[in-house]
């Protein structure tokens, strides 16, 4: 759990670093992957090997170049783009046949709840996971990884109004990706929000500063 970080380390985090950690938290229900490394995972060979395996399973070759390409894919060709394609499709034409009943149900829910943000929550939080894993695995330097995380968090703040708002969009994207109504990460977020220090110390309106990276 995030509340079990190294003694005293969390007190040294800047407000911007705490925000990045909080924004990454929905992805860590099973595996810790955040560029803000409160557990010293970069020092553990076991954790590095786990990060590499998870990255390769999701994104392919574990290289810095592929990390950058995966970030770009989330930004420009991610699930939010699929959502926009769905919104622009003529449901009375043959284009409607490309969606399962489950996908239509989920995308319609997204239209009702997040007509503008769509599935950006899922795509942007995934970027935090990607660069966290790349940093943990040793193929991306901290400076580059944390700058990508910083810009991603600024986009999150620009598009969402609260942690709950962000996680709502993230959860819909996660369920679309899984192909089922999985709520394990949503439950994890709710437990963290209730019991952990991280969301109490990282308000949504935190002013993000590059000098605090």
Image (cartoon, rainbow, N blue to C red):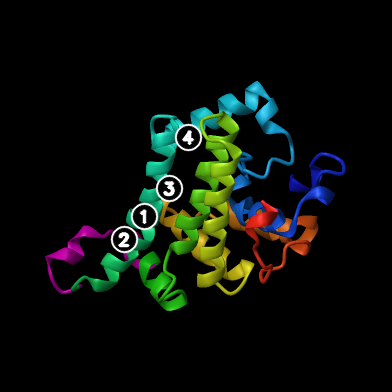
Residue under the image location 50 percent in, 65 percent down: 169
Q: Is residue 158 left or right of residue 15?
A: left
Of residues 94 and 38, the one drawn nearer to the viewer in this rendering: 38
Q: Residues within 10 Å of mark 3 (few under 14, many from 20)?
A: many
Residue 138: image quadrant is: top right
Furthest residue toward right: 8
Q: Taken as a whole, is the magenta stretch helix, strand or loop?
A: helix
Q: According to the image, label 1 marks what residue?
A: 78
Would you name the residue on which mark 2 appears?
A: 82
Residue 44 visible in the current orientation: yes
The alpha-carbon separation of the residues under discs 3 and 2 comes to: 16 Å
The residue to which callout 4 is attached is 55
Regarding mark 3 in the picture, which secondary structure is present there? helix
Q: Which residues are the magenta region?
A: 91-105
Q: Looking at the image, is 12 positioned above or below residue 164?
A: above
Q: Nearer the viewer, residue 190 or 122?
A: 122
């Amino acid at each position: 759990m995030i509340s079990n970080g190294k003694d005293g380390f969390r007190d040294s985090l800047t407000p911007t670093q705490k925000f990045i950690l909080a924004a990454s938290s929905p992805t860590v229900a099973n595996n810790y992957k955040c560029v803000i490394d409160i557990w010293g995972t970069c020092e553990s060979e076991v954790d590095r090997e786990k990060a590499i395996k998870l990255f390769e399973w999701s994104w392919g070759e574990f290289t810095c170049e592929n990390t950058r390409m995966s970030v770009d894919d989330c930004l420009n060709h991610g699930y939010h783009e699929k959502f926009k394609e769905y919104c622009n499709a003529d449901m009375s034409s043959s284009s409607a046949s490309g969606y399962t009943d489950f996908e239509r149900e989920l995308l319609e829910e997204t239209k009702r709840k997040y007509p503008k943000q769509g599935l950006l929550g899922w795509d942007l939080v995934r970027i935090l996971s990607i660069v966290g894993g790349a940093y943990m695995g040793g193929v991306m330097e901290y400076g580059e990884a944390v700058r990508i995380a910083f810009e991603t968090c600024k986009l999150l703040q620009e598009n969402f109004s609260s942690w709950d708002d962000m996680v709502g969009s993230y959860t819909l994207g996660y369920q679309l990706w899984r192909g089922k109504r999985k709520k394990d990460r949503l439950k994890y977020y709710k437990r963290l929000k209730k019991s952990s220090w991280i969301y109490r110390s990282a308000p949504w309106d935190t002013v993000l500063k590059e000098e605090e990276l």
